[in-house]
Amino acid sequence: QVQLVESGGGLVPAGGSRRLSCAGSGRIFRINDMGWYRQAPGKQRELVATITNGGSTNYADSVKGRFTISRDNAKNTAYLQMNSLKPEDTAVYYCNANIRITNWGLGRDYWGQGTQVTVST
């Protein structure tokens, strides 16, 4: 059984920083792309940032220059460093990863349970 568990959410003042973590556990052969998504109340889930197994990154325009995604392949963990937080960053943040459980075939997508980030004014 493969699981992704996020941590690090909480209440942050505007202009503050927060680091989210996403740890994969279970029968994992290889984690391909990893990413962070978020969903604010009444809105659709949106992409925040992604990172390939080799470290190439991609960001939503709304977070460029403020957020940094990274990963530690040895720990099957991804991170999202969020700086200069704004009230509009308030959302549930979800981790996503494409994971292979064997050394053959394609991976499949897994999601974490989400962690709430609330940015106060």
Image: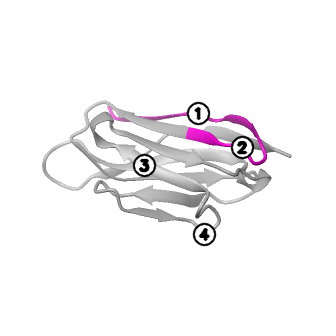
- Dot 1 or dot 3: first in sequence order is 1
Which residue is situated farthest in the bottom direction here? 61
- Dot 3 or dot 4: first in sequence order is 4
From the viewer's perspective, is the residue at label 2 or at label 3 nearer? 2
Q: Secondary structure at mark 4?
A: loop
Q: Is residue 7 magenta?
A: yes
Question: Residue at label 1?
Answer: 8
Question: Residue at label 2?
Answer: 16
Q: Secondary structure at mark 2?
A: loop
Q: Which residues are magenta?
A: 1-19
Find residue 6 and report its horizontal and vertical position in percent.
Answer: 51, 35
Find residue 40 and report its horizontal and vertical position in percent.
Answer: 71, 52
- Dot 1 or dot 2: first in sequence order is 1
Real-space Cα separation, disc 2 to disc 4, in angstroms: 19 Å
From the viewer's perspective, is the residue at label 1 or at label 3 nearer? 3
Towards the viewer: 76 or 1: 76
**Residue at 46% of width from left, 53% of height from top?**
35
Q: Is residue 22 above or below residue 64?
A: above
Whether pointer 1 and pointer 3 mark residues with C-beta atoms closer than 8 Å, the reply is no
Q: Secondary structure at mark 1?
A: loop
Q: Characterize the local packing of mark 3: few (<14), some (14-19) or many (20 or more) Cα atoms within 10 angstroms.
A: many
Find residue 103 and report its horizontal and vertical position in percent.
Answer: 13, 46
Residue 114 seen in render: no
Mark linked to residue 61? 4
55 lies left or right of 67: left
Whether pointer 2 and pointer 3 mark residues with C-beta atoms closer than 8 Å, the reply is no
Disc 2 marks which amino acid?
Gly
Residue 65 seen in render: yes
